[in-house]
Amino acid sequence: MPDARQEHWNTIFTTKAEEAVSWYQATPETSLRLIHACGLPKDASILDVGAGVSRLPDALLAEGFGTIAVLDISAAALAKTKARLGDKGRVVRFIVADLAEWQPDLTVDLWHDRAVLHFLTEPQDRAAYADALRRVVKPDGFALIAGFAPSGPERCSGLPVLRAGADVIGALLGPDFDLLEAFEEDHRTPFGGRQRFVFIRFQRRWSSSA
Ligand SMILES: C[S@@+](CC[C@H](N)C(=O)[O-])C[C@H]1O[C@@H](n2cnc3c(N)ncnc32)[C@H](O)[C@@H]1O
């Protein structure tokens, strides 16, 4: 795992309060709306990649989902989430890994990513991400990916980002994934700014080779 990348994120999560980062959301409303649109049963498995200290697992647990995994390069972020969830989090699997190197050992019905793929600015890192996603998402399963839109900011957390729409992300995932919906919306940062995001929902074809 490249130490600089991991160090960057561990420093963020050990020095900044939860609401002191631009991507903070009290409730991940759009992600939840897209997850609901997938119509999954409560025993479906869900993986949140680049989860940070997002409140998505809290909301999913409250809704009755019981097979949840969260992955992040930052052990500090996941430790905070684990502490926050307390006993409720005993059913959550915590995975510390760099998506550019991760060798998955699980499959899921839904892959969720809000603002991590956009940090993979090197083509080989994005290819590794897509390879992991194809190994993890079950046939008929879903991939929800959100990141900065083509007109969004050029940097996030002091790092350059890839700004891409559904065409670029769809081409990355490959022909086994059908585009179900894509739309842009503004994220209001805790500092009063606006960031243009794109949210994309894909479904893996049943017939695809998992
Ligand atoms: C902008 S934050 C978004 C966090 C969360 N998804 C949310 O919506 O609040 C990006 C997250 O991706 C994680 N991250 C960055 N690069 C990563 C990588 N290569 N592999 C895994 N996680 C990574 C960071 O540690 C951070 O938690």
Image: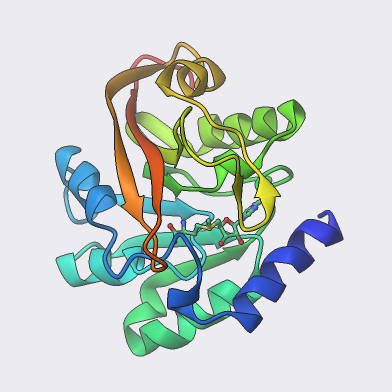
In percent of the image, x 44 and y 24: which residue is there?
165
In percent of the image, x 42 and y 38: which residue is there?
145
* 29 sits left or right of 168 in the view: left
Q: Quadrant of ligand 1?
A: bottom right
Whether residue 205 is visible here, answered yes or no, is no
Q: Is residue 71 above or below residue 143?
A: below
Q: Position of residue 104 (x, y in %)?
A: 61, 46
Whether residue 16 is visible here, answered yes or no, is yes
Query: Camera-side residue: 205 or 209?
Result: 205
Q: Give residue 9's quadrant in the image.
A: bottom right
In percent of the image, x 52 and y 65: which residue is there?
52
* 104 sits left or right of 62 in the view: right
Q: Is residue 139 above or below residue 176?
A: below
Q: Position of residue 101 (x, y in %)?
A: 74, 45
* 195 sits left or right of 3 in the view: left
**Residue at the right extreme, as displayed:** 3
